[in-house]
Image (cartoon, helix red, strand yellow):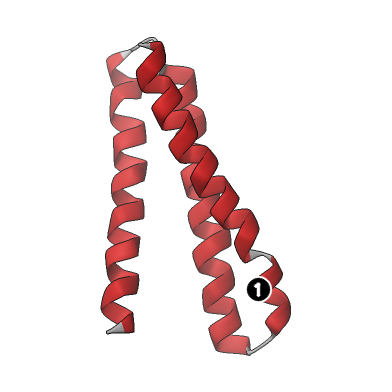
Amino acid sequence: SCSRRHLRLHRCRARCLRFARAPIEADGGGAPFLFAAGWLFAAGIVLFSGSLYALAVTHNRAWGAVTPFGGTCLLLGWGMLLFATLVK
């Protein structure tokens, strides 16, 4: 069902934040990029999921304009995570 899919997405995003944070404590070469990835994931989760929840609750279609910014933050977060692994 739709709610199970959303819960799976939230779990995936929570793992992203965990994966981005854990190596920072290990003092690796890509730590600044991992730090940026963590913030991009956090911003993406808030903007993407938050705008969809706001759209569902308020039925105000203007929230749909915020969703792509969250998606962009999530994609940039993945890019930073990839870049951090390549820099190491």
**Number of disc labels:** 1
Q: Is residue 10 left or right of residue 76?
A: left
Q: Position of residue 27 (x, y in %)?
A: 33, 12
Give the residue displayed 36% in from the left and 34% down from the top.
20
Question: The C terminus lies in which quarter of the figure?
Answer: top left
Q: Is residue 8 placed above or below 44 in the rendered structure?
A: below
Q: Position of residue 59 (x, y in %)?
A: 63, 90
Q: Is residue 30 left or right of residue 63?
A: left
Indicate the quadrant where residue 18 lies. Answer: top left
Give the residue displayed 52% in from the left and 77% down from the top.
53
Give the residue displayed 59% in from the left and 70% down from the top.
51
Question: The N terminus lies in which quarter of the figure?
Answer: bottom left
Q: Is residue 54 placed above or below 77 in the rendered structure?
A: below
Indicate the quadrant where residue 21 lies. Answer: top left
Location of mark 1 (residue): 64
Q: Is residue 50 placed above or below 21 in the rendered structure?
A: below
Q: Position of residue 30 (x, y in %)?
A: 41, 16
Q: Position of residue 70 (x, y in %)?
A: 58, 56
Give the residue displayed 42% in from the left and 18% down from the top.
31
Q: Is residue 55 placed above or below 66 in the rendered structure?
A: below
Label 1 SS: helix
Classed neighbour count for the residue bearing mark 1: other residues with Cα under 10 Å, few (<14), some (14–19), many (≥20): some
Three-letter code, disc 1? Gly
Q: Residue reaching furthest right?
A: 62
